[in-house]
Image: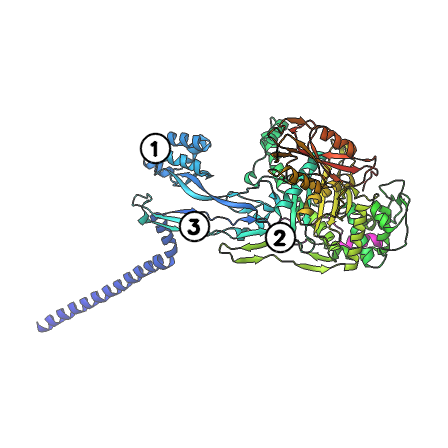
């Protein structure tokens, strides 16, 4: 019995032990499973679950950062950001609280001028708590939305959030330099908005609000965190706003005067540093509304495609894309005769010819070239006869330039094409720079090895290859600055909000391609091209300033249908010639049938460039060297509120004639107004009472008249004259264009600028 009891106790003990072991094993297994699950949830899935929890517990609203301001070199604001607001709805809350969908859609549609159907469509997504209705509205409109929300107690369904909008106060001014900002706040286009986006873009802020158990945002301050946005850096450009506007004014005038179907390009650079002072590309656009054409243009395109929406919108998009292109860096053209300056510089640098050489170039109107089927023609088909080097450049003689190129030789000529940077991009700090179409070294050598020198001949005067305006200006700058190829740039400096200079613009020199002596010789010949009565650039001359330049005319495209040719006329200039501070290129594209002027660089582009420099050079602080008797443009002094004696003395000292109207001791008003720029010798009327005439007059048509005739016709109507163009005065010098179109009604005393052109020589130069 005792043994049985012992066996029973032993059995029970063993059973408990086994049970205990089993419990321990199961406990350990369960702990391992639980630990594994905890490890999976808290370690492996920590980030994912944390994000889901945050998404359930908070509502986060992004606060856009203000982009940095863009300034011109003179401190003018070209682009800035301003606080605006976005309007959005919560379809989930509209559904949850059974708010009147039609009321919301109708109300917001009327206030925000958006489609009611669009709002109703976005309300259908009841799982969403964020559907944008309209972005970037001004304070006045936002206040109307707030009033609508309060009036109908829609605080849970309709919301406003702070945002930032990009503004361009000068609208079209320097639009291609600036580019634009897309809907997502990213810089776009070919301008600095895109190129310097990483600097201009700030760091967005956030508003974080806790949600209630039902998923609604808790609006009390204790349940909200605000993380301030950090504004972007400011960008200061080398672009001078005043020079830019002068260039734009004259380019837009040229489009009207010459019926330019392709628009035009103007580019100004400081040759000493590579800093770009002004850049114009036409057609342009308004960065404030970069995605829209003008209403008038939309109507024209709609009339062209009345029944085809697809073609209509394709035409709209094509025109928008073309208007966004910065042709100064992205478009390539045949430089034409402006390239003769490069050929001249190579010959001078290599000692093939000297500036004071006695060598005579004989032009019989054409020149045979080995390997070329047809001879190279001169624009003057009867030829220029015997001429010196300077005269050949003044005449823009093709055979003389080809003769120089043949002396240089193909190998050396091609080496200089590379040295002048024509085989590479300039490295300008803007996006979208093109390369152009030039020969490869293999193709060039292949033609030469087979005895074909036609490429060398055509290249010498800028034909059969293309380059961009920025590369042409960079190369010509080297001709004027002692031979240095500088990298062009528009960035002067980048400045953080605390005033720290983040990045500084600097002059980057790639190489010296010609000597100072060669540069001086080229400048001397450039001046002769403008100052000589037979120079093709004489229509760019400016009273009191020594400037130099070179004309160019090239064929852009030959259309097979109708054999209609499209031309680019151009003029490249440097001023002042003794120490150039500016190199300016003007290129006018595809003059239309309404252009009455002969198509050439000397007749079209040269006067435009001269008109620009006539305003730019005094602005740069350069004083003209003129005699008191010369009829140059001068600014009328302000003499209002002065005594009659004081006013008369000051005006006559500046070369003006004076006429007194009325009775009194002091000047009440004057005409032309103080600050107006007119020809010296103009009669200024001083009014001693308040009887100045305020009537309007009709502008007469003075195109084709000589200067004296045009001035008399304008002054007879009470209008005043500012002149530009050639300084010559003979029967073939006539008014080329006028700044106020004939029959326009203007106020008496208005100043009309007339451009005089010497029409003696007409030709493809």
Q: Quadrant of residue 96?
A: top left
Sequence-first tag of 3 and 1: 1
Label 2, residues with CA under 10 Å away: few <14, some 14-19, many ≥20: some
Distance CA(mark 3)–CA(mark 1):
30 Å
Residue 741 point in image, percent of width and height? 69, 30
Residue 504 point in image, percent of width and height? 58, 58
Q: Which mark is residue 294?
A: none
Residue 670 in magenta? no
Task: Kindly state the secondary structure of the residue where label 1 is placed.
Answer: helix
Tell me the residue that label 3 is attached to.
Answer: 205
Quadrant of image for the C terminus: top right
Sequence-first tag of 3 and 2: 3
Relative horizontal placement of residue 744, taking residue 38 as reference (left or right): right
Distance CA(mark 2)–CA(mark 1):
53 Å
Residue 430 in magenta? yes
Relative horizontal placement of residue 654, taking residue 666 as reference (left or right): right
Please name whichever residue, 350 or 528, is drawn nearer the observer in this view of the structure.
528
Q: Give above or below for 353 relative to 591.
A: below
Distance CA(mark 3)–CA(mark 2):
30 Å
Circle 3/circle 2 CB separation < 8 Å: no
Residue 545 point in image, percent of width and height? 74, 47
Please name whichever residue, 694 or 154, is drawn nearer the observer in this view of the structure.
694
Q: Which residues are magenta?
A: 426-449
Q: Residue lying furthest left in this view?
A: 1
Quadrant of image for the N terminus: bottom left
Relative horizontal placement of residue 701, taking residue 372 as reference (left or right): left
Q: Which mark is residue 151?
A: 1
Tell me the residue that label 2 is attached to.
Answer: 429
What residue lies at 75% left-to-right and 40% top-to-bottom? 631
């Amino acid at each position: 019995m005792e043994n049985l009891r012992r066996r029973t106790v032993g059995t029970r003990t063993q059973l408990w032990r086994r049970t205990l072991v089993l419990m321990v094993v199961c406990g350990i297994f369960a702990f391992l499973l639980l630990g594994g699950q905890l490890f999976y949830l808290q370690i492996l899935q920590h980030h994912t679950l944390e994000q889901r929890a945050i998404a359930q517990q908070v509502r986060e609203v992004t606060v856009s950062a203000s982009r940095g301001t863009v300034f011109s070199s003179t401190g003018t604001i070209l682009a800035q950001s301003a606080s605006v607001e976005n309007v959005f709805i919560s379809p989930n809350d509209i559904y949850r609280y059974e708010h009147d969908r039609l009321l919301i859609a109708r109300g917001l549609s009327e206030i925000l001028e958006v489609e009611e159907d669009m709002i109703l469509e976005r309300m259908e997504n009841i799982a969403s708590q964020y559907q944008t209705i309209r972005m970037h509205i001004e304070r006045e409109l936002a206040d109307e939305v707030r009033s609508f929300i309060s009036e109908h107690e829609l605080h849970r369904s309709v919301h406003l959030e702070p945002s930032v909008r990009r503004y361009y106060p000068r609208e079209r001014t320097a639009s291609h330099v600036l580019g634009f900002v897309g809907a997502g706040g990213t810089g776009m286009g070919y301008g600095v908005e895109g190129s310097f986006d990483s600097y201009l873009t700030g760091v967005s802020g956030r508003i974080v609000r806790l949600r209630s158990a039902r998923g609604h945002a808790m609006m009390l301050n204790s349940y909200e965190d605000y993380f301030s946005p950090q504004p972007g850096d400011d960008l200061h450009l080398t672009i001078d706003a005043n020079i830019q506007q002068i260039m734009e004014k004259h380019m837009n005038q040229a489009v009207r005067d010459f019926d330019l179907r392709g628009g035009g390009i103007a580019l100004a650079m400081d040759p000493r540093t590579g800093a770009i002072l002004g850049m114009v590309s036409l057609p342009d656009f308004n960065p404030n509304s970069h995605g829209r054409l003008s209403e008038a243009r939309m109507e024209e395109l709609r009339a062209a495609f009345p029944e085809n929406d697809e073609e209509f919108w394709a035409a709209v998009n094509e025109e928008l894309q073309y208007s966004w292109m910065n042709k100064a860096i992205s478009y390539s053209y045949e430089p034409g005769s402006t390239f003769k300056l490069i050929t001249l510089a190579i010959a001078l640098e290599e000692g093939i010819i000297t500036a004071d050489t006695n060598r005579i170039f004989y032009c019989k109107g054409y020149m045979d070239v080995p390997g070329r089927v047809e001879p190279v023609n001169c624009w003057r088909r009867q030829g220029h006869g015997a001429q010196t080097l300077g005269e050949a450049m003044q005449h823009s003689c093709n055979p003389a330039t080809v003769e120089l190129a043949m002396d240089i030789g193909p190998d050396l000529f091609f080496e200089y094409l590379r040295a002048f940077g024509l085989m590479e991009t300039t490295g300008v700090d803007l996006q979208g720079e093109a390369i152009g179409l030039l020969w490869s070294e293999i193709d060039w050598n292949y033609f030469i090895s087979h005895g074909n020198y036609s490429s060398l001949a055509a290249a010498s005067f800028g034909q059969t290859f293309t380059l961009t305006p920025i590369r042409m200006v960079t190369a010509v700058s080297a001709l004027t600055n002692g031979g240095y190829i500088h990298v062009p740039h528009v960035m002067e400096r980048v400045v953080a909000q605390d005033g720290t200079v983040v990045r500084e613009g600097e002059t980057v020199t790639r190489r010296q391609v010609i000597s100072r002596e060669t540069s001086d010789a080229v400048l001397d010949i450039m001046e002769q091209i403008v100052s000589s009565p037979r120079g093709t650039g004489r229509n760019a001359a400016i009273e009191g300033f020594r400037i130099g330049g070179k004309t160019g005319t090239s064929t852009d495209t030959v259309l097979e249908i109708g054999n209609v040719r499209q031309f680019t006329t151009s003029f490249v200039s440097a001023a002042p010639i003794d120490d150039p501070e500016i190199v300016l290129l003007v290129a006018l594209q595809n003059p239309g049938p309404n252009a009455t002027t002969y198509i050439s660089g000397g007749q079209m582009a040269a006067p435009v460039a001269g008109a620009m420099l006539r305003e730019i050079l005094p602005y740069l602080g350069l004083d003209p060297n003129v005699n008191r008797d010369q009829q140059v443009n001068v600014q009328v002094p302000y003499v209002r509120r002065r005594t009659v004696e004081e006013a008369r003395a000051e005006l006559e000292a500046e070369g003006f004639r004076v006429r007194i109207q009325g009775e009194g001791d002091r000047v009440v008003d004057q005409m032309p107004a103080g600050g107006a720029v007119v020809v010296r010798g103009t009669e200024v009327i001083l009014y001693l009472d308040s009887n100045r005439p305020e009537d309007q007059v009709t502008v007469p048509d003075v195109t084709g008249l000589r200067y004296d005739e045009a001035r008399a016709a304008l002054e007879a109507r009470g209008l005043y004259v500012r002149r530009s163009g050639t300084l010559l005065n003979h029967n073939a010098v006539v008014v080329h264009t006028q700044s106020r179109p004939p029959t326009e009604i203007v106020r008496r005393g208005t100043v009309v600028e007339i451009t005089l052109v010497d029409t003696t020589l007409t030709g493809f130069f």
